[in-house]
Amino acid sequence: MAALDALDPELTRLLHLGGPAGRPRRGLGRALDERVEAADRDRSGGDPLRELDIAAVYAAILAELAGGPVAPRTRARVLRIHQVAWFAGVRPRPGAHAVLAACRARGLRTGLASNAPYPAPILRAQLRHLGFWPLLDATVFSSGVGWRKPHPLLFATLVRRLRVPAAAILLVGDDPEADLAGARAFGMRARRAPRGGPPSWVGLLDAVDRLRRSG
């Protein structure tokens, strides 16, 4: 803890909020989770597809917890620590890596379009940590385009980065409205993501092969 104190005293002060000296605040991460979720639910009458300004959300939360404004560098570090702690506990769905590898073995381009308000560098670090980064040709995050699926700008950005027409894309997702309806409205094919382990991915690969033959 002494090394952290020397590196960033303000960050250390935040981590000690609510607990005796020398003992980190155990509820900081939970407080951040709850406040971000509340901000996501309450968009004050704005467009529900407009992505959150996550930096502003963190600034407000941390200022309230600290009793005053927190330096931008410290806010950025807290955001990164919070997100790294979160994705360290994520486990990919069984078979997900294999199906992406199978698509690439067929000569197909693969991409990810995600509703995620966090900065792209953190999200790319998550994909690297989970082993997905080398299996993807393109990524699009709502934080980067400012809008969430099913807004067409997110799908248009995916089409541009994959460098293939919308009609040649099969989008696999688990949200009927944001993923499936949004993709179809933009001219893509869409299919519900399999819920089980590797055997359930067989039907998805069959759909991929049918799309290749029809295109």
Image (cartoon, rainbow, N blue to C red):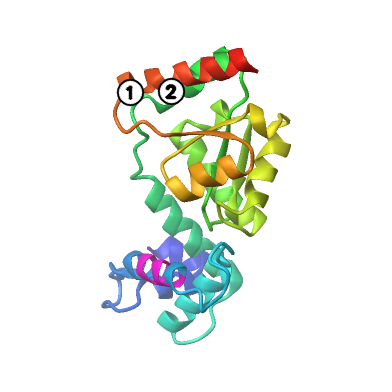
| Residue at 69%, 37% in the rendered image | 159
Residue drawn at 47 percent across, 50 percent down: 177
Dot 2: within a 10 Å radius of its alpha carbon, few (fewer than 14), some, or many (20 or more) residues? some
In the rendered view of the protein, which quadrant contains the N terminus?
bottom left
Q: Between residues 12 and 85, which one lies in front from this camera angle?
A: 85
Q: Is residue 69 left or right of residue 156?
A: left
The answer to the question of whether label 2 and label 1 lie on touching residues, with beta carbons closer than 8 A, is: yes
Looking at the picture, how far across and down is residue 179, in whole percent? 50, 44
Query: In whole angstroms, how far apart are the C-alphas of marks 2 and 1?
Result: 8 Å
Residue 191: image location, x then y, percent: 46, 33
Q: Quadrant of residue 73?
A: bottom right
Q: Which residues are magenta?
A: 33-39
Per the image, label 2 sits on a secondary structure element best described as helix
Q: Which residue is mark 1?
A: 200
Note whether 92 is above or below 54 in the view shown. above
The part of the image, by quadrant, that contains residue 112 is top right
The kind of residue tagged 1 is Ser
What amino acid is found at the position of numbered circle 2 in the picture?
Leu
What residue is shown at x 51% (from left), y 72% (from top)?
Answer: 57
* Residue at the spot of label 2: 204
Q: Is residue 25 left or right of residue 3?
A: left
**The C terminus appears in which quarter of the rendering?**
top right
Say whether residue 215 is left or right of residue 54: right
Prevailing secondary structure class for the magenta stretch in the rendered image: helix
From the top left corner, tell me how far across and down residue 136 is, in percent: 58, 30
The residue closer to the viewer here, 211 or 198, is 211
